[in-house]
Image: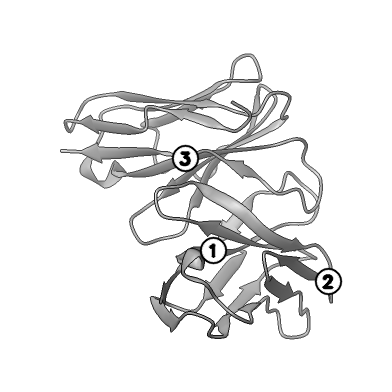
Amino acid sequence: GAGVSQSPRYKVAKRGQDVALRCDPISGHVSLFWYQQALGQGPEFLTYFQNEAQLDKSGLPSDRFFAERPEGSVSTLKIQRTQQEDSAVYLCASSPEPTDGQPQHFGDGTRLSIL
Amino acid sequence: GNSVTQMEGPVTLSEEAFLTINCTYTATGYPSLFWYVQYPGEGLQLLLKATKADDKGSNKGFEATYRKETTSFHLEKGSVQVSDSAVYFCALSDSGGYQKVTFGTGTKLQVIP
């Protein structure tokens, strides 16, 4: 498809397990963002990639969160030793380039539930 | 740091009523301003945007004007439809840099026939 694709759409894990969330951005998009959206809240920034370079990871809540984009296209967000507070929707967004006013294109998100 | 404050919902309106969702922001520099919409079961999508003071963004009958003097970007529509029922997010991105977006908490709109 032509949009941002995220998988899985839903993920249930037991506390302490590791999870990996995948994002396929729109082809050719330079910028890729991950956001975390808690229930009833707006998305909050986690990390930013420009091509394969992770330029900002200031929003990652702890060192259990790790993201990569090794070839500048597909990205993976990994959460180690999951905890209940990690339950949220994780959104990926991409944009063609980092220019002023450039809107982001969002995927449908991965809803993560930690039991 | 940057922040966005928008009116709390839910907002319930009858079809053809006038809609206003208030949004104010705090930012350094000259941010770009956006309204994103999330329809039930769907992902976030851009509704409209404005990139400089006094710009008006518009789409699908919705409008918002970038007011630098009041740091506001209120969303309006003259006559809402049932199909407008969704969650609306006001957002901003910094000028320069890589356009990290700061979102408001969202306002749920329900339009009843």
Image quarter hosting the C terminus of chain B? bottom left
Instruction: Tell me the kind of residue under disc 2.
Output: Asp
Q: Is residue A56 left or right of residue A50?
A: left
Separation (CA) of disc 1 from disc 2: 19 Å
Which residue is nearer to you in this view: A95 or A86? A95
- The residue type indicated by label 1 comes to Phe
Using residue A33 as the reference point, say whether residue A98 is left or right of it.
Answer: right
Can you tell which mark lies on residue B55?
2
Numbered disc 3: secondary structure: loop
- Position of B98 relative to A71 (above/below): below
Name the residue tied to disc 1: B89
Q: Mark 1 belongs to which subunit? A: B
Amino acid tagged 3: Asp
Is residue A24 depicted above or below A59 in this figure?
Answer: above
Q: Is residue B3 left or right of residue B10?
A: right
**Which residue was labeled with disc 3?**
A108
Residue B57 occupies which quadrant of the picture? bottom right
Identified at 54% across, 63% down, the residue is: B89
At x 78%, y 36%, the residue is A97
Q: Residue at x 37, y 32 (%)?
A: A9
Q: Is residue A87 left or right of residue B60?
A: left
Q: Are marks 3 and 2 in contact (CB under 8 Å)?
A: no
Q: Residues within 10 Å of mark 2 (few under 14, many from 20)?
A: some
Res A27 visible: yes
Within 10 angstroms of label 1, few (less than 14), some, or many (20 or more) residues? many
User: Residue A6, relative to residue A73: is it above or below?
Assistant: below
Counting from the top left corner in percent of width and height, residue B2 is at 62, 64
Instruction: Indicate the position of residue B99 as horizontal and vertical percent values.
Output: 71, 48
> Secondary structure beneath disc 2?
loop
**Image mark 3: chain:** A
> Relative to the observer, which residue lies in front, A48 or B9?
B9
Q: Position of residue A30 (x, y in %)?
A: 73, 29
